[in-house]
Image (tube, coloured by chain):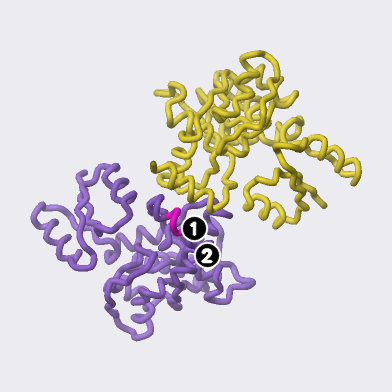
Chain colours: A yellow, B purple
Amino acid sequence: MPAVIVMPADAPALKIAATKGYGAEVILYDRYTQDREVLGAQLATERGMTLIPPYDHPHVMAGQGTAALELVQDVGGLDVLLVCVGGGGLISGCAVAAKHLAPACRVVGVEPEAGNDVQQSLRRGEIVHIDVPKTNADGAQTQHAGRLTFSVIRELVSDVLTVSDAQLVRTMRFFMERMKLVVEPTGCLGAAAALEGALPLRGQRVGVLLSGGNIDAERYAKLLLEAAR
Amino acid sequence: MPAVIVMPADAPALKIAATKGYGAEVILYDRYTQDREVLGAQLATERGMTLIPPYDHPHVMAGQGTAALELVQDVGGLDVLLVCVGGGGLISGCAVAAKHLAPACRVVGVEPEAGNDVQQSLRRGEIVHIDVPKTNADGAQTQHAGRLTFSVIRELVSDVLTVSDAQLVRTMRFFMERMKLVVEPTGCLGAAAALEGALPLRGQRVGVLLSGGNIDAERYAKLLLEAAR
C-alpha cells in the first residue's frame, strides 16, 4: 500500500535513501523549526491516509515490545533489561513484555545526557518538554515522551539513566571491533550504560537492546576515528 | 592449553590484541622476508608443541568446511557457492561439504586480482608460487595453495575468479550500510564477485561465505571513506 513517511531533514541520508528504496514517499521537515505532529495530521487529513505515529500508539508500543518478548523467550528470565529511550515506544512495549514474562526483571531506560527529558519526567512525575537536544544519538532527539508511553514508563520502568556522547561512540566502536556489528549511536545507549558502568551489574543476568544501525558511512567513519582519541 | 600463534607483523592490531586477549602468546614475523613454515616448524620442535598449519591439514580443511555444511543444512541445495581463497583451506573443506550435500552445486573461488595464485594454479594444473601480493585483502596474501588444499580444489572447484581492491571496499561499504555487518576486505571476496557481476547469477540459488571481520577501526574508517570516491 502507498506509504508517506515524514522524516527530519537531517536524518541519515542512508535512512532516507533506504526508505525511498522500499517504495515510500519521503517528506522532509526541519526538526528545529517545524512541528511534526501538525504536519503529519495535516497530511493524513488532506490525503485521506491513516496516521501512524512513531511511538505514542498502543499498537506501535506493542509491536516494538516484541523485541523484549523475543529476547526473554529466547534466553529466559533477566535481572535487568536496558533499553534506549527516545519517545518511549520501545521501552514501554518492552517493559510490558518483560514484566509479564519475568516480573522480577528491572527495566531501565537510557537516554543521551543532552536529551534526558524522560529521566526528568520520571523524577518529576509528569511529562517534561525540552528543546531539541544536540546529541550524536539522533534517534533519541525527542523533546518529550508520549502521553501513552509515559503512563507505562511511570508504572513499569525502574529508572532512566544517561550516557555521554563520548561513551556512545566508544561503545559504537566496541561493537565494530569486537562484535562486527554496525550500531548507530542511539542504538548503543543501553550497551553504553552497561559497558561504561552507569549501574552495578556484576553477577546479574543483563539484557540489552540494540535498536538500529542507520548511520551514514561518512559519519560512521568519522565517529570511529573520534572514538580513538 | 598453552597456544603460540605465529602472525605477520602487519596483521590488524585488533587481531593481534584479540589473540593475546584470549590468552595466546603471539610471535610476529615479517611476511615479506621471513618464512612462516620454517619458523613454525622450528618453534614446534624447540618447545615440543603440536604444529597446526593455517590451511594445509585435513582437520583444518574439514573444520573450515563446516561453514558450507551448516549453510547447506540451513538453506538446502545451492546452484553456486562463492568462497574466498587464500591458502585454500576454507574452499577445499567447503567444496567437500557442498559437493557431498548438493552435488549439482558449483563451487567458485574468489581471489584478489593482485594475488591470483590459485586461479593461475587451477588453469595451469599445478601449484603456482607468486610474490607476496599487495592487496587490501590481507587475509588472502598467500603465495601459493597447499599441497592438500590444491588437490581438493583441482577436483571439486569449478573456477576461481578475481575482484579488484576497489570492488572489495565497495562491497565492504555495502555490508556496513545495508547489512550492518563489519566484514574485512578478505571476507568480502565472494560477495564482491556476486555484487559486482563477476559471473552470471540471475535466477540461481547463490551461497556466499563471509569469512571474517578482523580489521582495525582506523583502517576500516579510511576504507569506508575511500569507497565513496
In the rendered structure, the residue with mark 2 lies on which chain? B
Magenta residues, start to end = B220-225
Classify A176 as above or below A123: below
Magenta stretch: dominant secondary structure: helix
Residue B168 locus on image (x, y percent): 47, 66
Report the front residue among A28 and A97: A28
A214 relative position to B23: left or right: right
Q: Residue furthest front?
A: A33
Question: Residue B222 magenta-drawn?
Answer: yes
Q: Label 2 sits on what residue type?
A: Arg
The residue positioned 72% from the left and 44% from the top of the image is A7
Residue A209 locus on image (x, y percent): 55, 35
Report the front residue among B187 and A40: A40
The residue positioned 27% from the left and 66% from the top of the image is B56
Instruction: Identify the residue under disc 2.
Output: B229
Residue A135 locus on image (x, y percent): 57, 35
Instruction: Identify the residue under disc 1.
Output: B225
The residue positioned 61% from the left and 39% from the top of the image is A138
Classify A41 as above or below A161: below
Q: Which quadrant of the view contains residue A101?
A: top right
Q: Residue furthest top?
A: A124
**Residue A60 shows which numbered tag?**
none
Check disc 1: other Cα within 10 Å, few if <14, some if 14-19, many if 20+.
some
Residue B123 locus on image (x, y percent): 38, 84
- Dot 1 falls on a residue whose secondary structure is helix
In the rendered structure, the residue with mark 1 lies on which chain? B
Check disc 2: other Cα within 10 Å, few if <14, some if 14-19, many if 20+.
few
Q: Label 1 sits on what residue type?
A: Leu
Q: Which quadrant of the view contains residue A153?
A: top right
A188 relative position to B186: left or right: right
